[in-house]
Structures are given as C-alpha cells and as structure tokens.
Image (cartoon, helix red, strand yellow):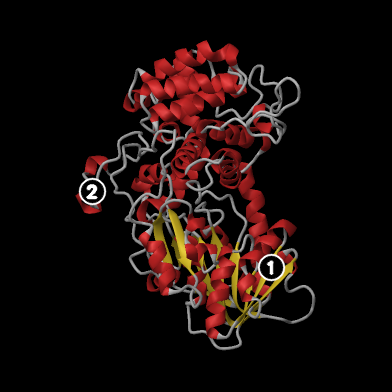
Amino acid sequence: MSAEEARSRGPQRDGGRGSGGRGSGGRQGGGPTGSGAARRPGGRPQAPRQVSARRVAFDVLRAVQVDDAYANLLLPTRIRRAGLSARDAGFATELTYGTIRMIGRYDAVVALASGRRADLVEADVLDVMRLGVHQLLGMRTPTHAAVSATVELAREVGVSRATGFVNAVMRKVAAKTPEEWDALVTAGLGGEALLATRWSHPVWVVSALRDALAAERSRDELAALLAADNEAPRVQLAALPGIATAEDVEQATARTAGDDVEAGDGPPVEPPVGPAVDDVAPDDAASDDDADDDTAAPAHATAPDLPVSPVGIRGVTGDPARVPGVAAGRLRVQDEGSQLAALALSRSSAVRPGERWLDLCAGPGGKAALLAAEAAQSGATLVANELVPARVGLVREALRDFRDTVTVVEGDGRRYGTDGSGVTYDRILLDAPCTGLGALRRRPEARWRKQPEDVAELAALQEELLEAAVRVLAPGGTLAYVTCSPHLAETRGQVDALMRRHGHELEQLDTAAVVRSVAVRDPQVADGRTAQLWPHRIGTDAMFIALVRRTA
C-alpha cells in the first residue's frame, strides 16, 4: 500500500470491519472494568483481576471512540477504579492522551505496516495497535515489552484471533525509527497536508492555525505550535488571591522539584519521541532560506517551566488532589492562560467598591472562582451564570467558599438585557463556547471531533452572546471577550464585527498592554488591541482575550 493510500482516510472512530457496533469500550458489565466479579464453579466469587495500565488506556480510548467520552474526565475515574500506583497512573495517562493526539499519524503507520487501510481493521484491534504504536514510537518503551504487551492486550480485550496480525504489525513498526516512519508517511506530501500528517492534526485545523499565526506575522511558527499541541501539558495551579496561604504555595511549589511516583509493574513514562525539534534559534538568526519553510522541524525551545500568571504555580507532579491547598480549595487546577484571561478583566483598572460583575458563561467555574476571589478582596460582587444544569452544579461547587460575594444563576446567557430590569454590570466576562482549538494539549480528542462546519454555528452563538453582554454593560464598564480558540472567525473576526456594530458606544482597550502588565514574565503577545496566547511560546493554552469599554 502506498503512503497516499494509507492517508486516504482520516482517523476511524468505529464501524471498522467486524467491529460489532459499540465495541468493548462501551460495555459496562462485568469483567476487569465492570462491576461484576467472576465466579468459580459453585458460586464463590473470585478475587477481582488486577487491571493493567494498558487496559485502562484501551478502555478509555474505546469509550472516546464509541461513546464520545472525554478522556480528561473518564481517565481519572478509571485509574482510581483500577487502583493504579502513581507510576502506572502516569504511564496510563501518557499512553491514553498520547495515542489520542497521534491517531491520525498512527493510522497511517498501521496502514503502511499492515498493507491494509486503517478503516478496514476491526475497531478493537485497531485501538490495540494504536496503543502499541505509541509505546514504540512515542514513549520509548523497550521493543520486546511493547510488542508482547500489545499482543497480550489483544487477548485480554477479546480479539485473540488477531494476535498473529497484531504481532506482525508491531514488529514491522518496531523495525524502523520514528524518523524513518515520518519519512514514509509524509512521502510525496507538502504544505498543510505534510504538516497534518507529521503532527497529527486535521488539515482544516492546520489551515486555521496557520491563518491565526499569519495575522500576527508569525506564520513561521506553525510547526512549533503543532508540535506543542502534541506535548503532554504540566499541571498548573491558581493560588486564589486572599484565600491561598504562603504555606499552600510553598507546599505546592515543593512538588515541582521531582516526580511523585511509586514503584509499579508498568514501565516509566519517557519523553515522547517524534520528528526532531531543534533547540531554540533566535528569530533574527533564522536563515532566509528557512524563513517561509513552516513544514520543517520547528526551531523553538520548550516554553520555560516558569509561571506567567501572578497567581500561577507550574509543573506540580503527581496527583494534584494530594496537594493540601488543592484539597482545601485554596489552590485550583487551572491553565495559566485562563488565569490571565480572568485577571486581565479584574485588573484592567482599579476596582471601585460596590461594582457588579458578571460571568456570562461560567461553567465549569474555574475563571469564576478566580474572579470571585478578586471581587471579594475589592468589595465587588459577582453573578455567575450558566446554562447547562450539570455545569451549574460544578459552578456552585467551585464557588462554595464565596457565598457572600457570588450569586449563581441558571439560564441562557442570551437572555441578558431583555427582561426590562435595567440591571447593568461594571465588568463582564464572556468566556464564549468555541471550537476549543487552543486547548488541544489538554483535550486530545477535540481535534478529531470538531469539523469546519462547527465554526459558523459557534460564531453565530458567540455573536448573540456578545450582543447580550453589550446590552447589560454599564457606562464605563469593561467587557472581556475570551475564547480557548485562536480561529480567526472566533477571535479577531468577532471583535471586528462587534466594533462595526457598536463602535459608537464601545472602544477597544490595549489588551496586549493589559496582559503584559498582569503577567509576571513576558507573555509574548503581539502588539495590538487583542491578545493571543500560544502554547509553544509560554506553555499555556492558546487563549484569546479582547477588552472593550462602554463609552456611552
């Protein structure tokens, strides 16, 4: 099979030949991950089987493929249920997330190694092999361990008939280096198609990210951005102002010095392996020949593991729930890009006691908690609005320590300003529903679920929410429009359209300057009236922030 044939189909979710519908990942009955225990003849229950890290990864991968599960929500539950050690939990986490991120690339590898298109491979078998390929090409697991464990996993999940096939494919994969496979799967490709295959992103996402970088004349950073999307993000915490103690911060910071792992039966997680990423090269040192070659290996260094947010703690190892401040609710797990977005609003100007603030789309409550802490310190009050009932519960839990400062309400954010009450707000955060293309490190399945046609639907919703926010923005009040997507239709395009509609009553603030003033180190945002954060520059999600003020 040619490389072109191997790439002819995108990553397959289910429905492969002989998949049998839902697949094993959708089963909720007995077995290693079910609630039932096997019984000996005579009815005496056997002790439950020990669930391996690889089986946990397989079950989550199948649930993502079959049931549209979210890996970041399901995986911790499965790890706890399996009773994995910290070491094995780390292995399962990298195996799961890394495999999901690289599905597109690994399907091309499997197709070439097997001589069979990925969509013609039985779904359970394909997922077993995807996990095996990641161990061989992405985790530096010893070849014998990766191959034998992958074959054993095939038996364990009920596809013993395919063990010979799995063994043969895994041995072919192991016979070549990651760099050799890169050459094979990208043979004959160029431009966005090459980047999409090399860095395992849909072509339309590559195109959108290229446009976003080009808008700030940084198109040559595209490969670095795509590579950053495939890196495992480190845990980042927010120390809630006025709530977190110096001891909380000290204890959390101490956990950034080394790995909090225990001995286990799984191999250690090693740095992912892929196409070479060069050491840092200053922009002014790039050669003219390379200036427009955004398909080459990116010339960038990993974003420094130093906080950029004034309340941020970066690089905590092990389970963050074990950090005392997190367990007590004074520290919160939150990307520093989200922290900067909330603080850009609360610290864009001096707060007057009695100000009313509104978080229009507050779920699940991370930014609302940071805003609540800021409001409590300055004498302001916050209304946290959320549409989805389940997320309302999450918001209430996130804000449980701020009952005197915060009111949580349930409802469609688009209703604001239509009830005739005349209530207005001095600061409004609109963290709008979006494609999530800026959080692909943390939500690995998002790149395969979103489609180009989703953008127009989301953009229409964003516009309606912006209109609602403007209706209840007080004179002199500030609105922060935020997305975790850099897609221009969701970011600059929305702000430009807003100013065309309301330029007579709104003015754009120098958001880049505000973000720089809030950050504790250079956030590396381009000059302008909006701010776009990037994971390959500062190690945060690609949050977009725009601040506008009502003038009339």
User: Closest to the observer: 473 or 326?
Assistant: 326
- The residue to which callout 1 is attached is 385
Residue drawn 48% across the image and 71% down it: 343
Relative horizontal placement of residue 291, taking residue 166 as reference (left or right): left
Q: What amino acid is labelled 2 in the image?
A: Ala
Q: Position of residue 284 (x, y in %)?
A: 22, 53
Q: Mark 2 points at which residue?
A: 281
Task: Pick whichever, 518 or 255, lies toward us.
Answer: 255
Location of residue 183 (image quadrant): top left
CA distance separating discs 1 and 2:
45 Å
Residue at horizontal 41 percent and vertical 56 percent from the top: 316
Residue 472 is left or right of residue 522, and the answer is right
Q: Residue at x 35, y 47 (%)?
A: 221
* Mark nearer the N terminus (1 vs 2): 2
- Which label sits on residue 89? none
Q: Which amino acid does label 1 sit on?
A: Asn
State yes or no: discs 1 and 2 in contact (Cβ < 8 Å): no
Q: Which of 552 and 419 is in front in this view?
A: 419
Q: Is mark 1 on a helix, strand or loop?
A: strand
Above or below residue 535? Residue 429 is below
Q: Where is residue 484 in the image (x, y as percent from the top left)?
A: 53, 56
Residue 336, picture quadrant: bottom left
Q: Residue furthest bottom?
A: 353
Q: Which residue is drawn at 35% across and 27% down?
A: 178
> The residue tagged with tag 2: helix, strand or loop?
loop
Q: Residues within 10 Å of mark 1 (few under 14, many from 20)?
A: many
Q: Nearer the viewer, mark 1 or mark 2?
A: 1
Q: x, y (%) of residue 211?
A: 45, 48
Quadrant including the C terminus = bottom right
Q: How many labels does the image show?
A: 2
Q: Is residue 183 visible?
A: yes
Outermost residue to the right: 419
